[in-house]
Amino acid sequence: MKDSSGNTGIDRKPSIETEPRTLSIDQIHYAREEALNVMRTSSIEQATTIFTQGLEAVDCGVTRQNDTSSMDDDVGEEELLLKNSKDVQAPELMTMRDVATAPF
């Protein structure tokens, strides 16, 4: 590509522009509204089934040696924070994100 001075330039695009389009902003808002509706009207077990239906496990093929951490280390952490917040305003609650605002 040549500019007006005759120099050859590089036509660069951000990598995000080469990625396929997924959802429009309207579709994202609609999906969020529907997710909130499911969370309001279903039990935790039913909502989990709805949100995970059709998903398959992916084997990444990478393992770390001496990795003692597990994926569920923080299970129950939110419940503990909520329990403690009844007595004292816990600053950790201020940083917790609403699960409905997490990306899909």
Image (cartoon, rainbow, N blue to C red):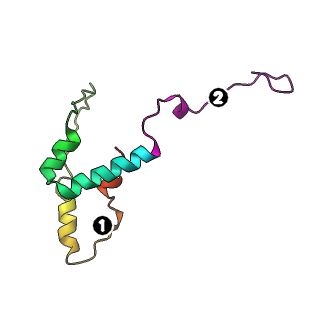
| On screen, residue 47 above or below 63 | below
Q: Foreground mark, 1 or 2?
A: 2
- Report crowding for label 1: few under 14, some 14 to 19, many 20 or more residues within 10 A (C-alpha): few
- Report x, y in % for residue 16: 52, 34
What quarter of the picture does the N terminus occupy?
Answer: top right
| On screen, residue 78 above or below 87 | above
- Report crowding for label 2: few under 14, some 14 to 19, many 20 or more residues within 10 A (C-alpha): few
Q: Earlier in the sequence, mark 1 or mark 2?
A: 2
User: Which residue is drawn at the image coordinates 21% and 67% (left, top)?
Assistant: 82
Secondary structure mostly seen in magenta is loop
Q: Nearer the viewer, residue 22 or 1?
A: 22
User: Which residue is drawn at the image coordinates 19% and 49% (left, top)?
Assistant: 73
In the picture of the structure, the residue carrying the numbered disc 1 is 93
Q: Quadrant of residue 64?
A: top left
C-alpha gap between disc 1 and disc 2? 43 Å
Q: The magenta stretch spans which residues? A: 1-25
Q: Secondary structure at mark 1?
A: helix
Amino acid, disc 1: Leu
| Magenta-drawn stretch contains 83 | no
What quarter of the picture does the C terminus occupy?
Answer: top left
Residue 65 appears in the rendering:
yes
Mark number, residue 12: 2
